[in-house]
Amino acid sequence: MLILDAHLDLSMNALEWNRDLTRPVPELRSREKGMTDKRDRCQGTVSLPEMRRGKIGLCVATQIARYVKPSNNLAGWHSPAQAWAQTQGQLAWYHAMEESGEMVQIRDIAALDEHIRLWTNNPPPDAPIGFILSLEGADSLVPLAHLEKAYSQGLRAVGPAHYGPGTYAQGTHHKGGIGPKGRELLAEMDRLGIILDATHLCDESFWEALDYFHGPVWASHSNCRALVPDDRQFSDEQIKALIERGAVIGGALDAWMMVPGWIKFKTTPAEAGVKLSHLLDHLDHICQIAGNANHIGIGTDLDGGFGLDQSPGDIDTIADLARLPEMFADRGYKSTDIERAMHGNFISFLKRAWSR
């Protein structure tokens, strides 16, 4: 079954982790032996061959570059110009993957339909991975005129914030609303038809953004606060608001978001007993709130600054997502609902958004 993963930091891994994602995952791990510059060395889970093996033929792929002011102790770039340049380097990598036939950018309904036909009709073993371009954290869009340029490059979704304070909104583990600059960003996104990704917005920014933005909203990689208390997750009230807006919420596989009590950089998957099935707990919770399976999807965030060290203990690579349809079936989901969860909900959302 075709799987759509709504959040993968592919270009970040290629450029900042120096991973040749055209190679098999075991080869990537082997080449990183002895490296200590990143916590997750030798523990990556994602490559394009593994995506093909698991039938993950379509994804939302990110650009990400945080601008940090001197008062911000998070890792990031020291000027918006540097952050913008980093996103352009990431875009160049996606273009290189297109030129080599490894990937293909999806910008509109016609391209989406063509790609779905390819992947649902016995695709060849070297079929290109389709990607919709997203920006995680909007701080690189200074001046705001960069947004229209990015749209012309194929950008179709924007998350205004990531972690901490931002230029246009406040993110995870921070507080505050979007303010005038955030409202300007959302107005321009609305004009261009860009999707608002509500993931990572702190509570105040979340509610202000939903009040002000009138376009399509999704949450590419978020789980449920009722199961794992933390403001990185959505409360039931927020989930209800997203459902009312027709959003799809992609369940994430970052282990600390899946089970309570995880201590970052200390807890191990074995100690926490975290498994792929915990993802279904979160998706089940969303379905119970919605009364249907029309608002769930997959947004793994695998290799999003972590690897096997912070992933479900019963997966080895992203190809293990292919086990999910059977797991859904074991929980009593109908085949039509399983297809919605694996790709259909996000595809229907994109068609609605791009028909505006």
Image (cartoon, rainbow, N blue to C red):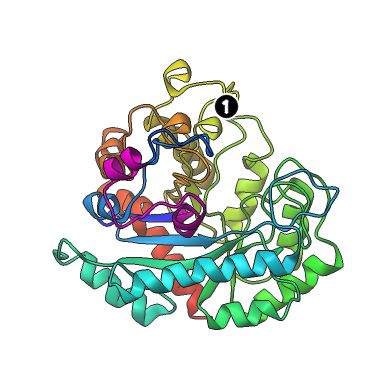
Q: Nearer the viewer, residue 7 or 326?
A: 7
Q: Quadrant of residue 334?
A: top left
> In x, y percent, where is residue 236?
63, 40
> In x, y percent, where is residue 42?
39, 36
> In x, y percent, where is residue 20?
36, 55
Q: Nearer the viewer, residue 2 or 31?
A: 31
The stretch drawn in magenta includes residue 60: no
Query: Residue sitting at 39 percent across and 65 percent down?
Result: 347
Query: Residue sitting at 69 percent across and 38 percent down?
Result: 231
Secondary structure under the numbered disc 1 in the rendered image = loop
Query: Residue sitting at 53 percent across and 43 percent down?
Result: 305
- Residue that label 1 marks: 265
For residue 213, say whether it is visible.
no
Residue 301, above or below 159: above
Q: Amino acid at mark 1?
A: Phe
What are the residue bounds of the magenta stretch?
7-31
